[in-house]
Amino acid sequence: MNRFTKKLISCLIPTHNGLELLRQNLPPLVGELGKSRLSYEIIVVDDCSTDKTPEWLGKFKKNKQHRFGAWSSCAFYL
C-alpha cells in the first residue's frame, strides 16, 4: 500500500471547559484506535478553557506515543 492509499482517521475534538469529558473519553478513544490497523491522528482544539484542560492535554500528550495534537486558542474579535 503506498502513501496515497493508506487509510487515515482524523479525530477533531473541539472543547471548552471539557476537562472531565476528555478525561473520561480520550484514553478509551486512543485505546480503540490503537487496536485498529488504521493510521490515525487526534487533534484537540481548546477554546480558552479555565478548568485546566490545556494543562491536562499537555500531560496527556507527553505520555503518549501516537499522533496527538492539542492547541489552545484565546482570540477575541470585535
Image (cartoon, rainbow, N blue to C red):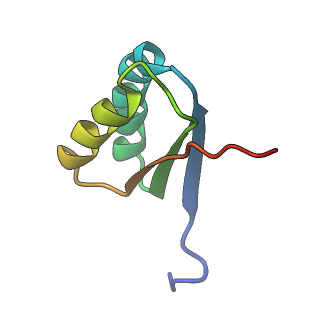
Q: Is residue 32 visible?
A: yes
Give 54 or 23, whichever is nearer the viewer.
54
Q: In the displayed structure, would residue 61 be above or below residue 1?
A: above
Q: Quadrant of residue 9?
A: bottom right
Q: Residue 45: x percent and y percent?
A: 54, 43
Residue visible at 42% across and 47% down in the picture: 36
Residue at the left extreme of this rendering: 63
Residue at the front extreme of this rendering: 78
Q: Is residue 35 left or right of residue 41?
A: left
Q: In the displayed structure, would residue 7 be above or below residue 78?
A: below
Q: Residue 11: x percent and y percent?
A: 57, 46
Give 10 or 53, whichever is nearer the viewer.
53
Q: How many numbered markers are drawn? A: 0
Residue visible at 22% across and 54% down in the picture: 65
Give 69 or 38, whichever is nearer the viewer.
69
Q: Residue 70: x percent and y percent?
A: 43, 48
Residue visible at 43% across and 24% down in the picture: 22
Q: Quadrant of residue 7?
A: bottom right
Q: In the displayed structure, would residue 66 be above or below residue 59?
A: below
Q: Quadrant of the C terminus?
A: top right
Q: In the displayed structure, would residue 30 be above or below residue 50?
A: below
Q: Is residue 38 visible?
A: no
Residue visible at 60% across and 83% down in the picture: 4
